C-alpha cells in the first residue's frame, strides 16, 4: 500500500511556527471532548488540516461545500467550526494569542484602554431575515459588526446584530462584556454614535467613555485620534473575503469568522511572518 502524498500548500495554510502557537489549545479541546464521547474508534480528523480549511474559507470567501477535495470533508470542517464557536474555543484562542502579542510588543497582557466602533455590511440571500435590519444612516440592509480593540488595534470583543440596532444599544452590551472580561480597562474611545447612553453606562461600570468627533472642516476621510486604530482593524478584517459580506446563517458564526480573521493576523504577528497575497506571485 502506498502512503498518501502530502497535498500542495495553500497561501492561507498555517506554518509550523504558527501551528505551534495554536496546537496546545486545540489539543486540549480534543482531550476534553474525548472524555465525554463514546470513542467508538471512528476516524479522527487532523486538527491542523481542519483549521487550515477554515482559514481557506475565511480568506477566499468560498462556500463550505466548495472546499477543495484535498482538505477534510466540508461536513467535518463545518462541524468543528460550529463546535469551536459554540464552546468558546475560537474566542479563547484569540484571547490567548492577543495576550502573547501584547507581551511581545512590551505591553501588559491585559489592556487598560480600548476603542469601540461598528460596521454595517450587506448580507447574502441565505441569511435569515429575522437576523437582519436596516441601518438608516448608511442605507444598508444587513447586519452590524460592533468590535472592541485595544490601542494596538487587536481584537478583544465582537458582537454581530441586525443592522438596525443602534450604536448606543450595542455599545452598552459591549461595555458590560468588556468590564466583565477585561476588568483592567478603564478608558474607551468611541464616535458620536455612542452618545449619551453608552457614556452613562460606561461611567456606571467604571469606564470613562470619550467621544472623538469628526473634523467637520475636513471633507471626506480624515485620520482621527485614537479612532484610526479601530478603523484599521476593520481594514484588516475586510482583507478576508468571507467577511466582505455576511454569509453566515447564525450571528454567532459571523462573530466567529471575524475572530478567525483576527487569529490569522495575530499568529502572523506573533511569529513575524507574512503570507502571499493576490498582489504577489
Image (spheres, rainbow, N blue to C red):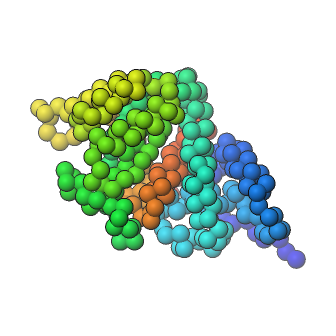
Figure disc tally: 0
Could you say which quadrant of the image residue 12 lies in? bottom right
Tell which residue pokes out farthest to the left in this image: 217
Left or right of residue 109: residue 37: right
Tell which residue pokes out farthest to the right in this image: 1
Residues 11 and 129: in front is 129
Could you say which quadrant of the image residue 18 lies in? top right
Could you say which quadrant of the image residue 220 lies in? top left
Q: Residue at left 80%, top 64%? A: 38
Q: Residue at left 27%, top 54%? A: 164
Q: Residue at left 56%, top 38%? A: 95
Residues 207 and 64: in front is 207
Residues 206 and 141: in front is 206
Place of residue 258 in the rendered image (x, y in percent of width and height, measured from the top left): 47, 51
Tell which residue pokes out farthest to the front in this image: 204
- Check the image and report above or below for 179 versus 257: above
Place of residue 124 in the rendered image (x, y in percent of width and height, measured from the top left): 36, 67
Place of residue 68 in the rendered image (x, y in percent of width and height, measured from the top left): 59, 71
Left or right of residue 24: residue 81: left
Q: In the rendered view of the protein, which quadrant contains the N terminus?
A: bottom right
Place of residue 166 in the rendered image (x, y in percent of width and height, measured from the top left): 27, 46
Q: Residue at left 29%, top 28%? A: 200
Left or right of residue 214: residue 160: right
- Residue 173 at least partly seen: yes
- Check the image and report above or below for 138 versus 43: above
- Check the image and report above or below for 220 versus 86: above
- Residue 11 at least partly seen: no
Amino acid at each position: 500500500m502506498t502512503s498518501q502524498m502530502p497535498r500542495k500548500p495553500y497561501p492561507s495554510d498555517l506554518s509550523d511556527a504558527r501551528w505551534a502557537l495554536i496546537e496546545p489549545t486545540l489539543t486540549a479541546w480534543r482531550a476534553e471532548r474525548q472524555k465525554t464521547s463514546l470513542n467508538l474508534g471512528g476516524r479522527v480528523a487532523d486538527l491542523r488540516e481542519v483549521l487550515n480549511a477554515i482559514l481557506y474559507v475565511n480568506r477566499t470567501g468560498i462556500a463550505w461545500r466548495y472546499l477543495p477535495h484535498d482538505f477534510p470533508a466540508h461536513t467535518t470542517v463545518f462541524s468543528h467550526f460550529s463546535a469551536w464557536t459554540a464552546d468558546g474555543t475560537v474566542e479563547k484562542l484569540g484571547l490567548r494569542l492577543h495576550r502573547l502579542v501584547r507581551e511581545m510588543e512590551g505591553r501588559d497582557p491585559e489592556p487598560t484602554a480600548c476603542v469601540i466602533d461598528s460596521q454595517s455590511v450587506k448580507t447574502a440571500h441565505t441569511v435569515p431575515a429575522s437576523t437582519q435590519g436596516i441601518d438608516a444612516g448608511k442605507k444598508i440592509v444587513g447586519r452590524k459588526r460592533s468590535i472592541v480593540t485595544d490601542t494596538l488595534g487587536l481584537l478583544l470583543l465582537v458582537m454581530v446584530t441586525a443592522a438596525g440596532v443602534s450604536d448606543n444599544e450595542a455599545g452598552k452590551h459591549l461595555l458590560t462584556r468588556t468590564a466583565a472580561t477585561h476588568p483592567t480597562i478603564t478608558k474607551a474611545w468611541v464616535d458620536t454614535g455612542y452618545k449619551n447612553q453608552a457614556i452613562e453606562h460606561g461611567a456606571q461600570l467604571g469606564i470613562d467613555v470619550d467621544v472623538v468627533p469628526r473634523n467637520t472642516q475636513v471633507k471626506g476621510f480624515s485620520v482621527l485620534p485614537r479612532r484610526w486604530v479601530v478603523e484599521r482593524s476593520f481594514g484588516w478584517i475586510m482583507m478576508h473575503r468571507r467577511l466582505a459580506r455576511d454569509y453566515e446563517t447564525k450571528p454567532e458564526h459571523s462573530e466567529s469568522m471575524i475572530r478567525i480573521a483576527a487569529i490569522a493576523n495575530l499568529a502572523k504577528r506573533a511569529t513575524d511572518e507574512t503570507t502571499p497575497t493576490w498582489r504577489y506571485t
